[in-house]
Image (spheres, grey):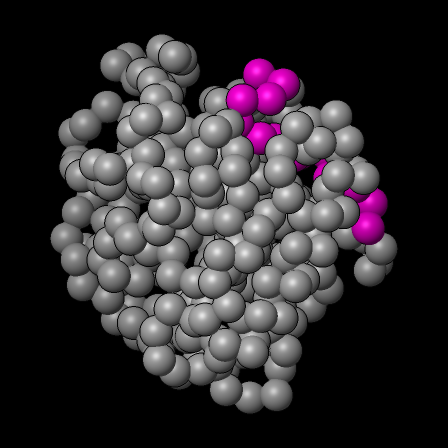
Amino acid sequence: MAAGLCGPGTVLSFDRGAFQTSPKVDNKWFPLTPGMQYTTAGTVESAEGTTKRMVTHTVTGLTKVIDGVKTQVLWDRDYADGELVESELAFFAQTDSGDVWLFGEYPEEFENGKFVGAPNTFLSGLSGAQGGIAMQGKPRVGAPSYVQAHAPAVKFLDCGAVVQENQRVCVPSGCYEDVLVIDERNPLEPEVGHQRKFYSAGTGLVKVTAVGGDNQETLDLVKAGQLTDAQLQEVNRQAQALDKHAYQVHPTDYAKTAPAEVATQTAGSPGAVSGSASPGTGSPSPTATG
């Protein structure tokens, strides 16, 4: 249990028995359906200037047990000015009451197309790291801030607070009603960034705006669509390769976890991402938008 990390009234209490036996994540603000792929795009403003940013978020068909809980694996690929700078696996699970927890991240970093390490890796239950709530089951304005995850070894502490409800937001992928706004910050490293994230019911993240920090990031959802079964199978293969590489990069902690396993090779709903781009390239065309 961690109390007060994100201000008065914040308590992080972890109970393995509170989690579903399946890795299904269907919180309406944070749905993770295997085979769904989302693309966000925008800019990062820093002292060095403006960088164009694009991120593909792909829900794999993989599961991985972390801290005794079976998690759903998300694969993100982050591009700066068209160049891959990060390829990350993130691990989520949902409680019976609908809270979605983040159980860790394995973010590989790249420079000039070459792998340079994954120094910000953390896994709940290892090296002092503790998973936390990525999205509450019943978020409401006025509730205390909550810990999204805490990994002191890598100075990771994300704090969330609901600041607005029932908002309307328009981004390139469409206009969204019933939008929830979360204020997100890291008290350990305030210079890293202070953000507002906008979540649409049934879709998930649709917008990110900057509040503070050295790097002012803004992102909008530009594409959302379902992969074909064949594309999901390729995503699973690539994400498993990333998971396998993690055992070489972080042999101490990662070796204490079982390898990610394929839970499904079938995309979660009808439809397909069209076009000639391969999964993970960051340039698919969607068949469904908000």
Magenta stretch: dominant SS?
loop
Question: Looking at this rendering, what residue extends furthest in the bottom direction?
Answer: 275
Residue 234 in view in this figure: yes
Tell me which residue sits at (49%, 57%) in the image. 263
Tell me which residue sits at (29%, 68%) in the image. 170
Drawn side of residue 198 relative to residue 125, left or right: left
In the rendering, at what x and y percent does residue 42 appear? 51, 62
Tell me which residue sits at (71%, 31%) in the image. 255
In this view, 283 is above or below 218 = below
Name which quarter of the figure residue 249 lies in: top right
Tell me which residue sits at (55%, 57%) in the image. 262
In this view, 191 is above or below 226 = above
Magenta-colored span: 115-128
Name which quarter of the figure residue 251 lies in: top right
The N terminus sits in image quarter: top left
In the rendering, at what x and y percent does residue 92 appear? 44, 43
The C terminus sits in image quarter: bottom left
Drawn side of residue 65 relative to residue 241, left or right: left
Drawn side of residue 18 relative to residue 221, left or right: left
Q: Is residue 218 located in the magenta-colored stretch of the structure?
A: no
In the rendering, at what x and y percent does residue 244 appear? 73, 48
Count the marks: 0
In the rendering, at what x and y percent does residue 91 appear? 50, 43
Front residue of this view, candidates 34 and 11:
34
In this view, 230 is above or below 182 = below
Name which quarter of the figure residue 137 lies in: top left
Drawn side of residue 225 relative to residue 86, left or right: left
Residue 214 in view in this figure: no
